Amino acid sequence: MAVASPTNNPPLTLNHLAGVQQDCSVTNHSVDSLGKAVTCGTVSGAVKTAYYSLNNAYFGGKSQDTVATGGYIRYETAPFYGVQAAVGYDIQRRLDDDNGHAEVSEFKNDKDGLAEAYVKWQNDKARVTVGNQRLDVPFLGDYSEFRILQNLYQAADVKLGNNDDFIRATKVNKFKSYGEDEFYKTSRQSAVKETDGMWSVGAGKSYKLANGNQLKGQVWYEDYDDYTKLAYAQGNYALANHPLKPEFAVQYITGKDQGKALAGNVDSQMYGAMLSLKPTSNATVKLAYDRIQPQSDAYRNGALLTPYSTNTSSSVIFAQPFFTSTQDLGAGNAYMIGVDGKYDDQTNLGARLSYMDLKESKNVDSRDQTELMVYGIHNFSGKLKGLSISNFAGIQHSPRYEGKENFFQNRLTVSLKF
């Protein structure tokens, strides 16, 4: 379940930075000369400082406190007959002293290197991107909003259509997580085992029904080399004119090992349902449930294997905690209720309560994991537009770890996007 994210300013052009007045208008996806494609190009990026504080981190009996700063910068040409090129750089520097205490792994080292670097062709109906890029494919997302370094894929990505009616194909060759400054043929599942990446195809379709109601569906197939093949389907039905604007959604996800089966036998079946309501124009309430069918002889008792989002994100899974990922916790039942709202035009507030009745083996007790997370994001305006401050704080409890304290986590981030 996505939460609100900080806003950012429109990108700056090289002309603006140099104080040059030049016509950078785009007609039919093109400026009128190759030279203007360069000089009318845009510079965008972010400067971030993040402080993570964890007590009894993931019930491991240790505390972690680390603060880091950095960000990224990207230059992208203006379109010339639909073609654009971009190159970017990201950097991270640790601010607190390395004094021997337990550290947040993705923040503990100074890193920098090539980030986004791609060539893109786009018109009103299609987009083709080749190179180092962000993706928004199920279980292949941009999970770096609350980190310093970018989460990127060296990939070829083709999309026809828009966000609701589309056909999409993606091939990933290498991957750079938010904890690294180089691209590797490994994944979040293993920092050692190399593969030939993954490929995916997906399609979506929406229908406008009577009284403004809408029906949407999407299907995906993803093939992770020597790990797993995954299929995902989701349907949504929204009642636009009802006072609460309810939206009903169902999902089905299945995974099966393939190739060398580097994670062992994978046999996962997951079913989910979600209800979204808007009691006011500024607030949304979501109730979600997922059933992961236990399989005692399979990977983590029948859990879903998602190599590029392991220990990172639950991605499209409806019922999810915030500080851990549903698919990493095992099989069983997952529940969630979330509230997201706008306090005013600049401030977003929210909370999420989840319960994970999951276990990773038939020989252990259920986690019975309860998590409560609250957050706030403030986006500044006027001369400070682009600057934001966010804080996400939460507590997890599990009787599996009786005798140990609860797991607390706080994530404070100050970000300036331009």
Image (cartoon, rainbow, N blue to C red):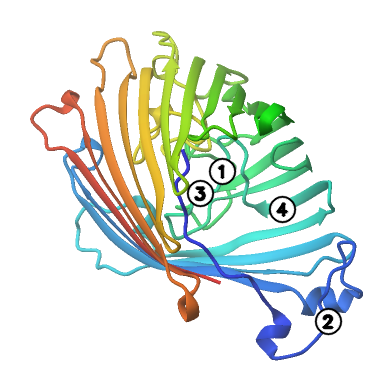
SS of the residue under disc 4: strand
Q: Amino acid at mark 1?
A: Gly
Whether residue 201 sits left or right of residue 411 in the image: it is: right
Instruction: Name which residue lies at 65% across and 28% down.
Output: 222
C-alpha distance separating marks 1 and 2 = 36 Å
Label 1 sits on residue = 141
Instruction: Give the residue displayed 43% in from the left and 64% down from the top.
Output: 346
Does residue 88 appear to the left or right of 126 in the view shown?
left
Q: Earlier in the sequence, mark 2 or mark 3?
A: 2
Q: Which residue is mark 4?
A: 131
Report the mark closest to the observer, 2 or 3: 2
For the residue carrying disc 1, how many other residues have a C-alpha within 10 Å: few (<14), some (14-19), or many (20+)?
Answer: some
Left-right relation of 65 to 111: left
Q: Which residue does the numbered mark 3 point to in the structure image?
A: 177
Depth-wise, is mark 1 or mark 2 nearer the camera?
A: 2
Residue 16, by quadrant, is bottom right
What residue is rendered at 33% in x and 51% in y? 375
| Marks 2 and 3, how far apart at CA | 39 Å
Task: Give the image quarter of residue 140.
Answer: top right
Determine the CA span between mark 1 and mark 3: 11 Å
Q: Secondary structure at mark 1?
A: loop
User: Residue 350, can we see it?
Assistant: yes
Disc 2, SS: loop
Can you tell which quarter of the image residue 414 is in? bottom left
Q: Is residue 329 above or below residue 310?
A: above
Q: If you read the primary sequence from the N terminus, does the residue marked by circle 4 or circle 3 appear first?
A: 4
Residue 322's x, y, as percent? 36, 40
Tag shown at residue 23:
2
